[in-house]
Image: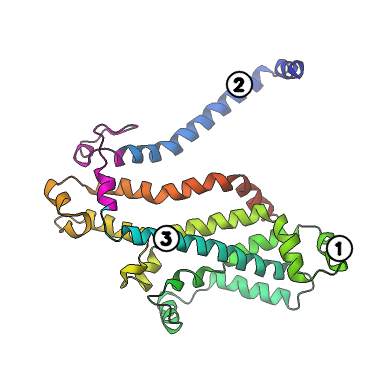
Amino acid sequence: MKNAVKEKHRKLSTSDRVFNAVNGLIMLFVIVIMLYPFWNTIAVSFNDAQDTLRGGITLFPRVFSLYSYQSVFKNKLMATAAVNSVLRTLLSTVLGVAVSSLVAYVLSRKDLVGKKFITAYFLVTMYVSAGLIPTYFLMKELHLLNNFLVYIIPGMLGVYNVIVIKSFMQQLPESLTEAAMVDGAGYFRCYWQIVLPCCKPVLATIALWCAVGAWNQWFDTFLYASSKDNLTTLQYEMMKLLSSASQSGRDNSSMFGQEAQVANTITPTSIRAAVTIVASVPILVVYPFLQKYFVKGVTLGAVKG
């Protein structure tokens, strides 16, 4: 084995070695420019807010301080918002993957009557929208205003997700389901026991998309549930923190506490950095577990429509 590796290295020409070196340097440069902004945000979030105004914070905090995070979590609604965001993300992800995969399985069947019409009907909804005001009145008529279900039901079915899963399912050998049906399995059993286990890569990809979308959403809270504190979400509360910190001269005691107002130890920059890290960490923790499925799920699910 070692001899084979040595022989392979001997065969590399000078141009190949130059190419590998340049390619490695380019990849290193890309990694640095992608990681630096996030790392700098971490450094700013752990630096004293007033010291940050002097500038010059790069990779490490100059005056270490946790007050920016203390100011963020001092909000009384933060715990409720975090619980709502976690529940919303979990339910939206599970139900979104389940409903989208079930619809995709139906549309992937060649024996579906009116398949082309139904697919075209779904596609139209991707490009034609009624608009914000009709959507608001629809939610009102469905009694979803100030209701936790307003976070779940509207996003249960994503047409783009259906298309990706459907494309993936169409690449599976038909002999798998045909053999199962010969043995007496029905459509749902084929879907549950045969098709879904083969679709782990694309399902993991869709789950990641659903989770990121649900976690980062705050505008629907503003539109449909802003009047009830028990329905607030983490992103919505952080949006209010940023808005409050950015308005000079505003009384921030209700948002950050009287201590922050007197000591003047918070700034829009410090709060923005702390909020960014708090909002990003949960998704960054989940992503490595789904990364191995991500590229495979996207590429295989997009080969044909």
Q: Quadrant of the N terminus?
A: top right
Three-letter amino acid code of the residue under disc 2:
Val
Q: The residue under label 3 is which amino acid type?
A: Ser
Q: How far is mark 1 from mark 2, CA to CA?
A: 54 Å
Q: Is residue 217 visible?
A: no
State the image coordinates of residue 73 (x, y, percent, origin top left): 29, 52
* Residue 286 shows in this picture: yes
Q: Which residues are magenta?
A: 44-73
Q: Secondary structure at mark 2?
A: helix
Q: CA distance from mark 1 to mark 3?
A: 43 Å
**Left or right of residue 78: residue 263:** left
Amino acid type of disc 1?
A: Ala
SS type, badge 1: helix
Question: Looking at the rendering, in which quadrant would you find the C terminus?
Answer: bottom right
Say whether disc 1 or disc 2 marks the residue closer to the N-terminus.
Answer: 2
Between marks 2 and 3, how big is the CA–CA gap? Answer: 50 Å
Secondary structure beneath disc 3?
helix
Residue 256 point in image, percent of width and height? 21, 54
For discs 2 and 3, the disc positioned in front in the rendered view:
3
Q: Is residue 62 above or below residue 103?
A: above
Counting residues from the start of the chain, the first of labels 1 and 3 encountered is 3
Few, some or many C-alpha atoms within 10 Å of disc 2 (few <14, some 14-19, many ≥20)? few
Q: Earlier in the sequence, mark 2 or mark 3?
A: 2
Q: Residue 18 has which mark? A: 2
Residue 283 x/y as whole percent: 47, 50
Report if the CB atoms under discs 2 and 3 are less than 8 Å apart. no
Q: Are marks 1 and 3 in contact (CB under 8 Å)?
A: no
